[in-house]
Amino acid sequence: MAAKSLLKKYQEKRNFDISSEPFGDPEIAKGKKDIFVIQKHDASNLHYDFRLLVDGVLKSWAIPSTNPKDKRLAIATEDHPVEYADFEGVIPKNQYGGGTVMVWDTGTYKIKKKDKEGNLIPLENQLKNGRASFVLNGKKMQGGYSLIRIKQGEDEQWLLKKSDDDKADARKNPVSTENKSVLTGRTIDQIKKASEKDGN
């Protein structure tokens, strides 16, 4: 499916005359692949948005829990444009998703799941089947992860699960110890204060 049509829901929810979020240009996604981003989002509830570039758009899930257990609830949200991977700032409070956004982590991912013939299964196909596996190579998050769909429909829900590999360490919880943007080195409060200073 074309990225332009995949972004329709994203664009309908936003007023780009007010919000500084990117509108989305499908041409920008061409040539880019296998990136991920995790954004800390202080909206009505503090949560993390996990995004994987698939089929020219950022497939997105909101992760409301910061509990350091292996499995985390991941609520599917609308697809976002690839430019959103670099978005950091404040969405006006009267807008959809109003609040401060910080790029908490970013990097690349690899798929390793193969079919019976030994060919890699595209992540798009894995997601359609309700179970996707990938390896993250980020600045904070690394190693194997799985997304497992547990509820279909309008309020689609998934579980994000860490694989038991050499990057798994139950003693580490980067969500509570790593509080700065990987793009600008700012905390979410510093991003908010800078926006207020600029009058946004």
Image (cartoon, rainbow, N blue to C red):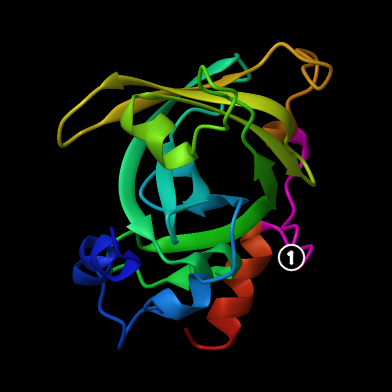
Q: Quadrant of residue 6?
A: bottom left
Q: Is residue 146 visible?
A: yes
Q: Is residue 17 magenta?
A: no
Magenta residues (range): 177-187
Q: How far from the left and from the top, in percent, is residue 82?
A: 50, 66
In this view, the residue in front, 72 or 1, is 1
Q: Is residue 178 magenta?
A: yes
Residue at x 60% of width, y 59% of height: 102
Location of residue 97 with respect to 23 vertically, above or below: above
Location of residue 18 with respect to 115 vertically, above or below: below
Q: Is residue 21 visible?
A: no
In this view, the residue in front, 117 or 143, is 117
- Residue denoted by label 1: 183
16 on left or right of 89 = left
Residue at x 22% of width, y 67% of height: 8
Q: How far from the left and from the top, in percent, is residue 40?
A: 56, 50
Question: Which residue occupies the extreme front position in the image?
Answer: 117
Question: Which residue occupies the extreme left position in the image?
Answer: 154
Residue at x 61% of width, y 51% of height: 34
